Image: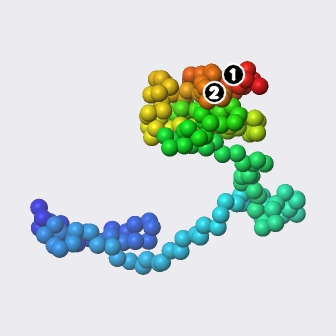
Protein backbone atom coordinates (compact mmCIF):
# COMPACT_ATOMS: atom_id res chain seq x y z
CA UNK A 1 0.00 0.00 0.00
CA UNK A 2 2.93 2.33 0.64
CA UNK A 3 3.95 1.87 -2.97
CA UNK A 4 0.60 3.25 -4.15
CA UNK A 5 1.08 6.58 -2.29
CA UNK A 6 3.20 9.05 -4.15
CA UNK A 7 4.18 12.62 -3.42
CA UNK A 8 1.20 14.91 -3.96
CA UNK A 9 0.78 18.65 -3.59
CA UNK A 10 -2.45 19.69 -1.88
CA UNK A 11 -3.52 23.33 -2.34
CA UNK A 12 -4.71 25.19 0.78
CA UNK A 13 -6.97 28.22 0.99
CA UNK A 14 -4.42 30.17 3.07
CA UNK A 15 -1.86 30.32 0.27
CA UNK A 16 0.35 27.55 1.66
CA UNK A 17 0.92 24.30 -0.16
CA UNK A 18 1.53 21.10 1.78
CA UNK A 19 3.55 18.35 0.21
CA UNK A 20 2.71 14.84 1.37
CA UNK A 21 5.49 12.29 1.01
CA UNK A 22 5.44 8.49 1.37
CA UNK A 23 5.88 7.16 4.91
CA UNK A 24 9.30 5.79 4.12
CA UNK A 25 10.81 9.17 3.28
CA UNK A 26 12.54 11.50 5.73
CA UNK A 27 9.77 14.09 5.85
CA UNK A 28 6.11 13.30 6.36
CA UNK A 29 4.76 16.79 5.68
CA UNK A 30 6.76 19.72 4.34
CA UNK A 31 5.49 23.25 3.79
CA UNK A 32 6.35 25.09 0.63
CA UNK A 33 4.89 27.93 -1.31
CA UNK A 34 4.79 31.67 -1.34
CA UNK A 35 4.69 32.71 2.33
CA UNK A 36 4.80 36.40 3.14
CA UNK A 37 6.10 37.72 6.45
CA UNK A 38 3.27 38.88 8.68
CA UNK A 39 3.56 41.95 10.89
CA UNK A 40 1.64 41.83 14.16
CA UNK A 41 -0.13 44.86 15.58
CA UNK A 42 1.62 46.76 18.33
CA UNK A 43 -0.11 47.15 21.71
CA UNK A 44 -0.58 50.84 22.45
CA UNK A 45 -2.59 50.83 25.69
CA UNK A 46 -6.26 50.65 26.50
CA UNK A 47 -8.21 52.87 24.16
CA UNK A 48 -11.68 52.49 22.76
CA UNK A 49 -11.67 52.80 19.00
CA UNK A 50 -14.58 52.24 16.73
CA UNK A 51 -15.66 53.00 13.22
CA UNK A 52 -18.03 55.61 14.65
CA UNK A 53 -15.08 57.64 15.96
CA UNK A 54 -13.35 57.57 12.59
CA UNK A 55 -16.46 58.60 10.61
CA UNK A 56 -17.72 61.39 12.87
CA UNK A 57 -14.73 62.84 14.78
CA UNK A 58 -16.37 66.24 15.26
CA UNK A 59 -19.38 64.82 17.11
CA UNK A 60 -17.38 62.86 19.69
CA UNK A 61 -14.27 65.02 20.05
CA UNK A 62 -15.58 66.67 23.24
CA UNK A 63 -15.72 63.32 25.05
CA UNK A 64 -12.17 62.30 24.18
CA UNK A 65 -9.10 62.79 26.32
CA UNK A 66 -6.03 64.83 25.36
CA UNK A 67 -4.44 61.88 23.53
CA UNK A 68 -7.50 61.09 21.43
CA UNK A 69 -8.79 58.01 23.27
CA UNK A 70 -11.55 57.59 25.78
CA UNK A 71 -10.72 56.81 29.38
CA UNK A 72 -11.18 53.11 30.23
CA UNK A 73 -10.87 53.34 34.01
CA UNK A 74 -10.66 56.17 36.46
CA UNK A 75 -8.74 56.35 39.75
CA UNK A 76 -10.69 56.64 42.97
CA UNK A 77 -10.81 59.97 44.78
CA UNK A 78 -9.24 58.56 47.93
CA UNK A 79 -7.02 55.52 47.85
CA UNK A 80 -7.32 53.68 51.15
CA UNK A 81 -5.46 50.42 51.44
CA UNK A 82 -6.72 47.70 53.73
CA UNK A 83 -3.44 46.68 55.33
CA UNK A 84 -2.48 43.02 55.57
CA UNK A 85 -1.62 41.99 59.13
CA UNK A 86 0.63 39.06 60.08
CA UNK A 87 1.94 37.54 63.30
CA UNK A 88 4.76 40.09 63.40
CA UNK A 89 2.65 43.25 63.34
CA UNK A 90 -0.60 42.02 64.99
CA UNK A 91 0.26 43.41 68.41
CA UNK A 92 1.18 46.90 67.20
CA UNK A 93 -1.47 47.29 64.53
CA UNK A 94 -4.53 45.78 66.21
CA UNK A 95 -4.09 45.37 69.95
CA UNK A 96 -2.24 48.64 70.60
CA UNK A 97 -4.29 50.77 68.18
CA UNK A 98 -5.61 54.12 69.42
CA UNK A 99 -8.97 53.63 67.65
CA UNK A 100 -11.32 50.78 66.77
CA UNK A 101 -9.97 48.18 64.32
CA UNK A 102 -11.96 46.05 61.88
CA UNK A 103 -10.14 42.81 61.08
CA UNK A 104 -11.18 40.57 58.19
CA UNK A 105 -10.01 36.96 58.41
CA UNK A 106 -9.80 35.56 54.88
CA UNK A 107 -7.94 33.20 52.51
CA UNK A 108 -7.10 33.62 48.81
CA UNK A 109 -8.99 30.46 47.80
CA UNK A 110 -12.23 31.56 49.54
CA UNK A 111 -14.92 32.84 47.13
CA UNK A 112 -17.08 34.60 49.74
CA UNK A 113 -13.93 36.31 51.05
CA UNK A 114 -13.33 37.83 47.62
CA UNK A 115 -16.96 38.96 47.55
CA UNK A 116 -16.62 40.86 50.83
CA UNK A 117 -13.29 42.61 49.95
CA UNK A 118 -14.98 45.53 48.12
CA UNK A 119 -17.32 46.04 51.08
CA UNK A 120 -14.37 46.24 53.48
CA UNK A 121 -12.67 48.72 51.11
CA UNK A 122 -15.80 50.91 51.13
CA UNK A 123 -15.98 50.80 54.93
CA UNK A 124 -12.31 51.79 55.17
CA UNK A 125 -13.07 54.89 53.07
CA UNK A 126 -16.31 55.65 54.90
CA UNK A 127 -14.78 55.49 58.40
CA UNK A 128 -11.39 56.98 57.52
CA UNK A 129 -9.85 58.44 60.70
CA UNK A 130 -12.35 56.70 63.00
CA UNK A 131 -11.70 53.04 62.18
CA UNK A 132 -8.69 51.12 60.95
CA UNK A 133 -9.38 48.23 58.59
CA UNK A 134 -7.00 45.33 58.08
CA UNK A 135 -7.05 41.75 56.85
CA UNK A 136 -5.45 38.55 58.11
CA UNK A 137 -4.69 35.74 55.68
CA UNK A 138 -5.50 32.64 57.73
CA UNK A 139 -3.19 30.49 55.58
CA UNK A 140 -0.19 32.72 56.33
CA UNK A 141 -1.04 33.51 59.98
CA UNK A 142 -2.84 30.47 61.40
CA UNK A 143 -1.82 31.25 64.98
CA UNK A 144 -3.92 34.45 65.05
CA UNK A 145 -6.91 32.60 63.62
CA UNK A 146 -6.50 29.83 66.22
CA UNK A 147 -6.13 32.31 69.08
CA UNK A 148 -9.48 33.92 68.25
CA UNK A 149 -11.32 30.69 67.36
CA UNK A 150 -11.80 31.33 63.65
CA UNK A 151 -13.54 28.26 62.26
CA UNK A 152 -15.20 29.80 59.21
CA UNK A 153 -14.12 32.49 56.78
CA UNK A 154 -14.78 35.23 56.03
CA UNK A 155 -15.01 36.37 59.63
CA UNK A 156 -14.94 40.05 60.54
CA UNK A 157 -13.98 41.07 64.08
CA UNK A 158 -14.04 44.50 65.63
CA UNK A 159 -11.42 45.32 68.25
CA UNK A 160 -11.39 48.32 70.56
CA UNK A 161 -8.80 49.04 73.25
CA UNK A 162 -7.08 45.74 72.47
CA UNK A 163 -10.19 43.63 73.14
CA UNK A 164 -12.47 41.78 70.77
CA UNK A 165 -15.85 43.53 70.85
CA UNK A 166 -17.93 41.99 68.04
CA UNK A 167 -17.78 39.19 65.45
CA UNK A 168 -19.62 38.78 62.14
CA UNK A 169 -19.29 35.47 60.31
CA UNK A 170 -19.87 35.03 56.58
CA UNK A 171 -20.22 37.26 53.53
CA UNK A 172 -22.78 39.72 54.84
CA UNK A 173 -24.14 42.94 53.31
CA UNK A 174 -22.55 46.29 54.04
CA UNK A 175 -25.50 47.31 56.22
CA UNK A 176 -24.82 44.43 58.65
CA UNK A 177 -21.18 45.46 59.05
CA UNK A 178 -22.13 49.13 59.37
CA UNK A 179 -24.56 48.39 62.21
CA UNK A 180 -21.85 46.40 64.01
CA UNK A 181 -19.37 49.25 63.63
CA UNK A 182 -21.85 51.93 64.73
CA UNK A 183 -22.23 50.26 68.14
CA UNK A 184 -18.77 51.47 69.11
CA UNK A 185 -19.02 55.16 68.12
| Label 1: few (<14), some (14–19) or many (≥20) C-alpha neighbours in 10 Å | some
Q: Say what secondary structure mark 2 lies in.
A: strand
Residue drawn at the location 40% of the way across and 71% of the way down:
16
Task: Judge by depth and name the residue closer to the eye, 6 or 137.
Answer: 137
Q: Say what secondary structure mark 1 lies in.
A: helix
| Residue receiving disc 1 | 180
**Residue 16 as seen in the image, left or right of residue 67:** left
Q: Earlier in the sequence, mark 1 or mark 2?
A: 2
| Label 2: few (<14), some (14–19) or many (≥20) C-alpha neighbours in 10 Å | many
Where in the figure is residue 20, as x and y percent of width and height?
Answer: 25, 69
Task: Tell me whether circle 1 and circle 2 mark residues in contact (CB < 8 Å).
Answer: yes
| Residue receiving disc 2 | 158
How far apart are the alpha carbons under marks 1 and 2? 8 Å
Where in the figure is residue 72, as x and y percent of width and height?
Answer: 72, 54
- Quarter of the image holding residue 65? bottom right
- The answer to whether residue 44 shows anywhere in this view is yes
Q: Nearer the viewer, mark 1 or mark 2?
A: 2
Where in the figure is residue 57, as x and y percent of width and height?
Answer: 84, 64
- Quarter of the image holding residue 19? bottom left
- As drawn, 182 above or below 8: above
Amino acid sequence: MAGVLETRTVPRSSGFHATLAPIGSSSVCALSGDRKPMRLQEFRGLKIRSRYLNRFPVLVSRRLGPRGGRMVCEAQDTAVDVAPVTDTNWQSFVLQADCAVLVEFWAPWCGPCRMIHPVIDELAKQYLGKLKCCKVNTDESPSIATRYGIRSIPTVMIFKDGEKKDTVIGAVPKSTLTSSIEKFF
